Amino acid sequence: MQDNDPLILLLSRGHFCPKEHQQHLELAAFHSKIAVAYTQIVTITTDAISELNEFRDSVGASWTFLADPRRVVQKDLDIQEYTDPHHDPMIPHTFVLAPGLVIYSIYNGYWFWGRPSPEELRRDLREVTRTIRPDWDLAAPGLRENWDGNKTLHWPYKPERADG
């Protein structure tokens, strides 16, 4: 899903949580900017698929949601939210990932103010993109020459084929 682009990964408490709804509503409103910047979002929740679909629809999200009702992620990362034994959710986290699933930033969202705002995500994504895009600054030395040559430093960063 990530390819060579940044990714926002949300580990979610689930459909029952008003904090999750608010965060996902904000991301849904911000999503057109995220998408045009070649950035993906993925939400993983402990909800069953039917609850997950209702949650995604209720916030107007169009990105990938993954169901983890067996709590594999929660157990593998040891992030069980022990304060809610009834729902047994994972502690919500938001990750901004550079290509290769490299962690750039982590937000712990147990409290709502621990979750990143769209502006904080924008700042993180700007820095990640600046580091992964050789053509970030078109005025950088050598970029014009590369454009006139093999274009390997320009998006989509693929060498030209020898046969044209």
Image (spheres, rainbow, N blue to C red):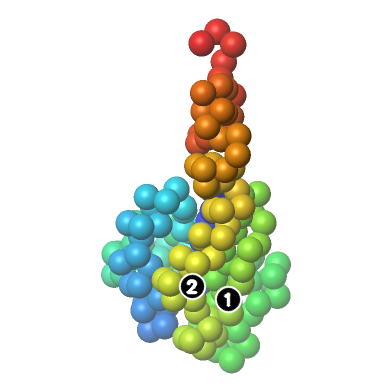
| Between discs 2 and 1, the one toward the N terminus | 1
* Image coordinates for residue 144, horizontal then vertical, percent: 52, 32
Task: Please give the name of the residue rendered at 62% of the width and 88% of the height, measured from the top-left corner.
Answer: 82
At 51% from the left edge and 60% from the top edge, which residue is drawn?
A: 126
Residue 18, picture quadrant: bottom left
**In the displayed structure, would residue 40 be above or below residue 58?**
above
Using the image as rendered, state which of residue 50 and residue 20 is in the foreground: 20
Q: Secondary structure at mark 1?
A: strand
Residue 11 appearing in the image: no
Residue kind at label 2, given as amino acid type: Glu
**Which residue is at a point 55% across and 8% down the rendered structure image?**
163
Question: Looking at the image, which residue sits at the far bottom?
Answer: 83
- As measured in the structure, the alpha-carbon distance from the residue carrying label 2 to the one carrying label 1 is 10 Å
Task: Specify the amino acid type for callout 1.
Answer: Tyr
Instruction: Name the residue beneath numbered marker 1.
Output: 107
Q: Is residue 54 left or right of residue 81?
A: left
Q: Position of residue 23 (x, y in %)?
A: 40, 76
Closer to us: 104 or 108: 104
The residue at 60%/48% (across/down) is 132
**Residue matched to label 2:** 120
Give whichever of 147, 81 is nearer the camera: 147
Q: Residues within 10 Å of mark 2 (few under 14, many from 20)?
A: few
- Horizontal and vertical percent for residue 33? 36, 57
Residue contact between numbered discs 2 and 1, judged by CB atoms under 8 Å? yes
Q: Is residue 67 left or right of residue 36?
A: right
Residue 102 visible in the picture:
yes
Q: Secondary structure at mark 2?
A: helix
The quadrant in which residue 54 appears is: bottom left
Q: Position of residue 122 (x, y in %)?
A: 46, 65
